[in-house]
Image (cartoon, rainbow, N blue to C red):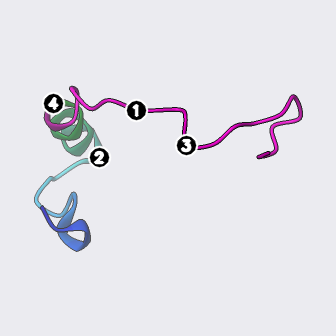
């Protein structure tokens, strides 16, 4: 999947969002890459 073509085959944003969520629903996100303080700034 090329980033420059992302969404170009869909007629509406809703159909793009639907297929995007179906494709990437099993992604795992790790929050250990950065830490935020109480103000929301990186530490």
Identify the element where label 2 is drawn: helix
Identify the element where label 1 is drawn: loop
> Which of the two labelled residues, at mark 2 and mark 1, occupies the earlier sequence position?
2
Q: Name the residue at 25% across, 67% down.
A: 3
In this view, 29 is above or below 10 = above
| Distance Cα–Cα, label 4 vs label 1 | 16 Å
Residue pointed to by mark 2: 13
In this view, 16 is above or below 2 = above
> Which of the two labelled residues, at mark 4 and mark 2, occupies the earlier sequence position?
2
Residue pointed to by mark 1: 29
Residue 22: mark: 4
| Distance Cα–Cα, label 4 vs label 2 | 14 Å
Residue pointed to by mark 3: 33
Residue stretch in magenta: 23-43
Q: Name the residue at 55% across, 35% down.
A: 32
Q: Is residue 26 magenta?
A: yes
């Amino acid at each position: 999947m090329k980033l420059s073509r992302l969404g170009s085959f869909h007629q509406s944003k809703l159909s793009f969002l639907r297929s995007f969520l179906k494709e990437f629903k099993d992604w795992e996100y790790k929050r250990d890459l950065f830490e935020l303080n109480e103000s929301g700034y990186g530490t």
